[in-house]
Amino acid sequence: MNQPLLLFRVHALERMFQRHISEEDVKTVLANGEVIENYPQDLPYPSRLILGFCDNRPIHVVAADTPDQRYTIIITVYTPDPSQWDPTFRRRIMQ
């Protein structure tokens, strides 16, 4: 099966620009990352939070697939805040 096409929401593109995260970084996270949270109730499609590393920098990508899996929608992208995540960036710290 072909790789899904990536559709970047405007919000994701804005955050990528602000946070100096490239499209290649996002592709690396999608290809090699680990799903750390699932959001099955998200609309219009269930989404997931993926953790990946680019040059030892942790990056979180929230993405959703269309039902036909032809597209992966990139909802947001960010570098996790160490004050809000455990040292592995896999679990949220309860405040």
Image (tube, grey):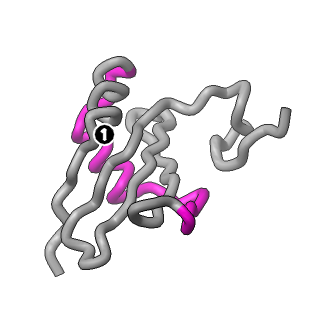
93 left or right of 58? Answer: right
Residue 30 is one of the magenta-drawn residues: yes
On the image, numbered disc 1 is attached to which residue? 25
Residue 48 horizontal/vertical position (percent): 49, 59
Compared to residue 49, the image places residue 80 above or below, namely above
Relative horizontal placement of residue 91, taking residue 57 as reference (left or right): right
Query: Image point 56% across, 65% down: which residue?
Result: 41
In the rendered image of this protein, does residue 28 appear above or below residue 80? below
Check the image and report above or below for 33 versus 4: above
- What residue sits 30% from the left and 54% below the top? 73
Q: Which amino acid does label 1 sit on?
A: Asp
Q: Position of residue 7 (x, y in %)?
A: 21, 51
On the image, which quarter does residue 32 sit in? Answer: bottom left
Q: Residue at x 56, y 61 (%)?
A: 39
Residues in magenta, as a range: 19-41
Q: In which quarter of the image is the C terminus?
A: top right
Residue at the top extreme of this rendering: 18
- Please tell me which residue lies in front, 79 or 42: 42
Instruction: Describe residue 79's horizontal placement relative to residue 77 as left or right.
Output: right
Magenta includes 93?
Answer: no
Q: Residue furthest front?
A: 44
**Secondary structure at numbered mark 1:** helix
Q: How crowded is mark 1: few (under 14 residues within 10 Å), some or many (20 or more)?
A: many
- Image quadrant holding the N terminus, namely bottom left
